[in-house]
Amino acid sequence: MGRLNGVNIINFDNTLIYESELIAKAGKVLDFTNISGLKLFSSLDKLQKLSKNCFPL
């Protein structure tokens, strides 16, 4: 199986570090481990911080 076109991985807490094949096939791996408290469900301020990192003005 080749690259997964259009598939990106968002790394919040290194839970996928053992998925080396998946990581190798992904388009990008976005590292957000520097934002503590950011999980599947997060507060508005954490999501705003994520947004600023993804889409800086």
Image (spheres, helix red, strand yellow):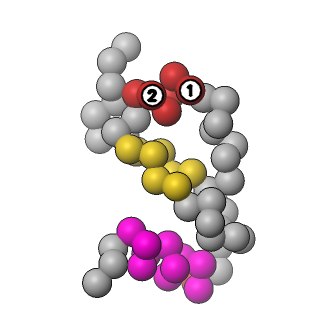
The reply to whether the magenta stretch includes residue 27 is: no
The main secondary structure of the magenta stretch is helix
* Amino acid at dot 1: Ser
Residue at the spot 39% in from the left edge and 68% down from the top edge? 54
What is the magenta range?
45-54
> In the image shown, does 47 or 14 lie closer to the viewer?
14
Give the crowd class for mark 2: few <14, some 14-19, many >=20 residues within 10 Å. Answer: few
Q: Residue at x 57, y 51 (%)?
A: 11
In the rendering, which numbered label is found on residue 55? none
* Residue 20: mark: 1
Tell me if I can see residue 22 in this picture. yes
Side (left or right) of 11 relative to 26: right
As shown in the figure, which amino acid type bears the numbered disc 2?
A: Ala
Q: Are marks 1 and 2 in contact (CB under 8 Å)?
A: yes
Name the mark on residue 24: 2
Image quadrant holding the N terminus, namely top left
